[in-house]
Amino acid sequence: MKNLRVLGAKGSREEIARTIASCALSDKQYEELLAGAIDADRLKAVKWILRQSPLEKWSPIRAFEMAIVSGKLNIVRWIFEKETIPLDNGIFMLVGRHGHVDIFTYLSSQICKRPRENVHWPDSVRRIDTNVYPEGDDGHDEEEDEFCGCANGCDEGCYNRGMQLYCHEDNCHQGPNCGNRFTSHENAITLFDTGSSKGIGAKANQDIPAGTLIVEYVGEIIDIDQVRARNYPFYTMHLEGDLYIDAARVGNNSRFFNHRCQDQNCEIQKWGRGARTRIGIFSKRDIAIGEELLIRYAGELPFACECGAKCCVSKQK
């Protein structure tokens, strides 16, 4: 097979069509083909390849990201105007990381043209309720949990809660009286446009008491080798061992929680069931309706922070 990157960069439409029709291209091979067309700034070829490739193999968001990395403003503009691309913090992190000022200026100018309230779920991200594990893994584990033994509902004294294990039908008989189920309150979240480089954010649409599990952080479960291969640090959160949650292309409202260096109103907690771990975002204090929901991102920030906190890392540099 001809080098796909070269084919995308120099091949005729007929050559590209013949390759797509005769070969069952893998995701990686489609990426090579598309990368060649993007690197060569061949907008017509990019359009045609995206039309020919199945959506389950290629979403416009991936081509958008690749165009950003390559610094191809005309391709970025075409995809952005054609598709519903979320201008969230991950996109601006990617732009900043590669230093493309013209792309940053263009995307920044588009923020004010979008409604600031009740942002719709982006078409480029598939919405899910639970983690997506690799094929053949249903996300459950055979290891049994300790039975909590509570008699009158599960409260602060529940054994499982003290061990940060959540109750379920196999280790708790309290049913609806149990106060230690891993049940989120995602309906308390409204997405909105922050009007800054942070892009889309999440805020409370009702008062949220302290200690509430607001939402579970969910996405695609991948291993460390896949993390390195994707080389995309945004929306990736360590789960356990060498497993990570990648919410770049699949997820729920949790992927839109923005970072704050200090005084966050939410925190990340890991809770278990048997040998399995789940990640929840909990309220650290009482949160009033209308407040933006903020967490602290782990590790070194790959972007210039604009959180405005007194100890913001950007002010310390």
Image (tube, helix red, strand yellow):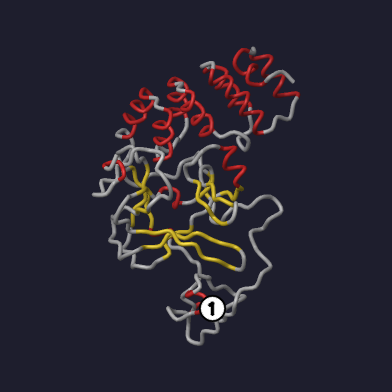
Q: Residue at x 45, y 49 (%)?
A: 255
Q: Is residue 253 left or right of residue 32?
A: left
Quadrant containing the N terminus is top right
Q: Residue at x 37, y 43 (%)?
A: 200
Between 140 and 130, the one lying in front of the other is 140
Between 300 and 162, the one lying in front of the other is 300
- Specify the farthest residue to the left: 310
Local crowd at mark 1 within 10 Å, few (<14), some, or many (≥20)?
few
Image position, residue 101 (x, y; %): 36, 24
Q: Is residue 5 left or right of residue 294?
A: right
**Residue 300 sits above or below residue 35 on the image:** below
Instruction: Name the kind of residue labelled 1 in the image.
Output: Gly
Between 208 and 267, the one lying in front of the other is 267
Image position, residue 209 (x, y; %): 33, 68
Quadrant housing residue 76: top left
**Residue 64 sits above or below residue 41 on the image:** below
Q: Residue at x 65, y 32 (%)?
A: 28
- Specify the farthest residue to the bottom: 151
Q: Report the number of discs.
A: 1
- Judging by the rendered image, the residue that carries numbered circle 1 is 175
Q: Secondary structure at mark 1?
A: helix
Q: Residue at x 48, y 51 (%)?
A: 252
Image position, residue 170 (x, y; %): 62, 75
Image position, residue 33 (x, y; %): 63, 23
Q: Is residue 149 left or right of residue 117?
A: right
Quadrant containing the C terminus is top left
